[in-house]
Image (spheres, rainbow, N blue to C red):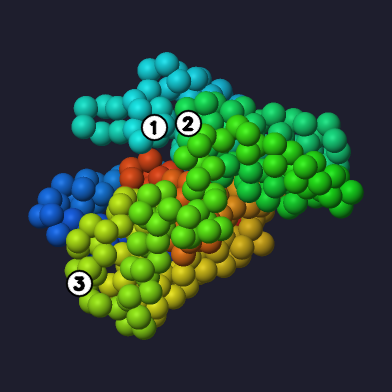
Amino acid sequence: MKVSERGILTQFDYSLFLGALILALLGALGIYNASSGGGDYSIFLRHLLWIALGVGVCLFVMSIDYHFLADHALLLYALSAFTLVGILFFGTEVNGSRSWITLGSLRFQPSELAKLTVILLLARYLGELNENHLRRKHFLVLASITFLPMILITSQGDLGTALMYLPILFGMMVVAGVKRRLLVTVLIVSLCVAPLSWFLLQDYQKQRILATFDPGLDPQGIGYQSRQSQIAIGSGGLFGKGLGQGLQSQLGFVPEIHTDFIFAILAEEIGFVGAIIILMLYLLILMRLIRIAETARDRVGILLITGVACLMFFHVGINVGMTLGLVPPIGIPLPLLSYGGSATITTFAALGLALSVYQRRFFC
């Protein structure tokens, strides 16, 4: 039975959508307050445009049967990989990373959207398997699908974004069914190889890691951003200093505060209570994604939701960890809150996939 237009309209997860929209508006509020110090509201107005486009993309993706997207996952993945290759030669370099496409005054980062094509292709491949447990040959295929964009993105100089593909891979593998022995083997090999990656890092990346473990190493240099972020969060106290009253943000003490460190400005202005509310909204979205996965009508839907959940919440964990000085600053935005069209549209598109799965849980 095909899903009717009336069925589509009545099967809508309002909690998931409204939770995401509230977070996006809170992010816009933080960006507005960060812009008020200099009197330039162009970033704020541009971000409102990205949110509007993101909502439109979310509803558009929701209207498409996720089976159709999964059936064309290989084509979407190939187009995405081709774009990532082209970026290496024709991309725009921003902050030392050649990972942007520039169209007039707008920039877009294809590596963000590529995460969705990886999720789609992994879900399609795993969904077609008839075995209860993954074998080594399956792992090799999954690793190849994931590592290709990771290598291309790392070549662009954006290691942080590349690393975010790993939680997607491991999360979907675990849900698909992986033998404990294979999982332990993969983890042991990863732990053994991880120290070797130190020699592949740039000097500034090494310094960021060292500064995380030793905050006093270079407080005015490589550790400045993280240190000021912690000061901003701590100074907010229980209820915050008030909207637009954060000294760290208004006086520009925290660099890139409207992007990677948006959580710091909000925590300073609305305090510990407000920060907890933000985290509770993320928890609401996670709970709704888990519920959608539980009610999904097939394996592909479950795996798609798994990929979306891993994509969002490892971003949240690492970004909040960055602002608290627990994780080295690696340029990971906070979903829905941070300024940036690429991340905003990708997150809304991912939630559109989840809504598509939810709406079709009773229909073919």
Q: Give the image quarter of residue 264.
A: bottom left
Q: Is residue 41 left or right of residue 84?
A: left
| Residue closer to the observer: 331 or 243 | 331
The residue indicated by pointer 1 is 96
Residue farthest along the left direction in this orientation: 39
Measured Cα–Cα span from mark 3 to mark 2: 36 Å
Q: In this view, does 240 lie to the left or right of 114?
A: left
Q: Where is residue 177 in the image (x, y as percent from the top left)?
A: 80, 50
Q: Return the disc, 1 or 3, that comes first in the chain's sequence.
A: 1
| Residue closer to the observer: 189 or 142 | 189
What's under tag 2, amino acid-wise? Gly
The residue shown at (40%, 66%) is 230
Q: Give the image quarter of residue 241.
A: bottom left
The residue indicated by pointer 2 is 157
Residue 120 visible, this orientation: no
What's under tag 3, amino acid-wise? Gln
The residue shown at (42%, 49%) is 222
Residue farthest along the right direction in this orientation: 181
What's under tag 1, amino acid-wise? Gly
The residue shown at (20%, 72%) is 245
The residue indicated by pointer 3 is 245
Q: In this view, does 44 lie to the left or right of 322?
A: left
Q: Where is residue 176 in the image (x, y as percent from the top left)?
A: 76, 48
Residue 182 visible, this orientation: yes
The residue shown at (66%, 62%) is 294
